[in-house]
Image (cartoon, helix red, strand yellow):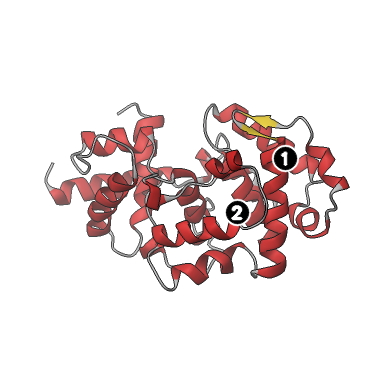
Amino acid sequence: MTFYELKEFLDLKAEHYQSQEFITADPIQIPHRFSRKEDIEIAGFLIATIAWGNRTSIIKNSNKMMQLMDDSPYDFIKNHSSEDLKVFNGFVHRTFNDSDLKYFIISLKNIYKNKGGLEKCIANHASKMDIQTALHYFKKDFFELPHSQRTQKHVADPLKGSAAKRINMYLRWMVRSNKNGVDFGIWKSIHTRNLSCPLDVHSGTIARKLGILKRTQNDAKAVVELDTQLRIMDPEDPVKYDFALFGLGAFEKF
């Protein structure tokens, strides 16, 4: 395919897969149950954090997290006491366990109480630097309270080489327009042109087959390489191609 044929192909696939039809088997369905901004962004952040492995297991454990917070994540975050954290005893999703979840709850309370919430905390950094660098400083904010060292692995740091797939996916959820009923578009202080593709096995494999990614590792350098190509195709909304790349890999076995 020529560049223009490839762009047309990916534009069509992106439009096809950014559809409500495909979110019934996707973890993004869970924050769609909420209407309050804070509930959506907190639920989305926690669910994106555990979004690896079997999708059925991700959805099951995401639902469990919401139930343990009485399906009111913002109220729980804002008002919980140390005693309330016991409700998470025994929670586990792969390597993310109850001690990790308890720290996330404590840290989110600090972020909403002292830093203006998740959007402001990330956007304040993003206003001064690129998004991937901003995520490095967001991680510093997130772990500024006493915590177990092991918990840090559950928030990616692009400056340490991570592709940061889950948090880039979370930003796509929060920032991109909700015109197709998939993403939410509730964060207005970050522009879609600055977002990065959530690079994973599916999107990486398809990008290489299509010749828009050469690097063999799915790491931070690969994200930069892929972003460069996607921004040529659509400078204003490059991350829309996540739908095309993921859909071609996960659903079409392209």
Question: What amino acid type is highlighted by mark number 1?
Answer: Met
Mark in the foreground, 1 or 2: 2
Above-or-below relation of 56 to 172: above
Is 59 above or below relative to 66?
above
Can the viewer see residue 120? yes
**Which of the 4 image quadrants contains residue 54?**
top right
Q: Is residue 220 left or right of residue 21?
A: left
Mark 2: amino acid: Phe
Residue 118 falls left or right of residue 241: right
Q: Residues within 10 Å of mark 1 (few under 14, many from 20)?
A: many
Could you say which is closer to the camera, residue 174 or residue 224? 224
Q: In percent of the image, x 80 and y 57: which residue is there?
A: 75
Q: Secondary structure at mark 1?
A: helix
Residue, disc 2? 143
Query: What residue does disc 1 label?
Result: 65
Which quadrant of the view contains residue 195? bottom left
Residue at (37% x, 33% y) in the render: 202
Tally of marks: 2
Residue occupying the far right of the picture? 83
In the displayed structure image, the side of residue 65 where residue 53 appears, left or right:
left
Task: Provide residue 42's location: percent of width, then percent of height.
Answer: 66, 54
Rounded to the nearest whole Å, what is the CA distance between mark 1 and mark 2?
Answer: 21 Å
Residue drawn 76% across the image and 29% down it: 90
Image quarter of the N terminus: top left
Q: Residue at x 60, y 41 (%)?
A: 151
Q: Nearer the viewer, residue 116 or 69?
A: 116
Image coords of residue 82 (percent x, y)? 84, 49
Instruction: Answer whether residue 180 is visible to the viewer in this image.
Output: no
Picture quarter with the C terminus: top left
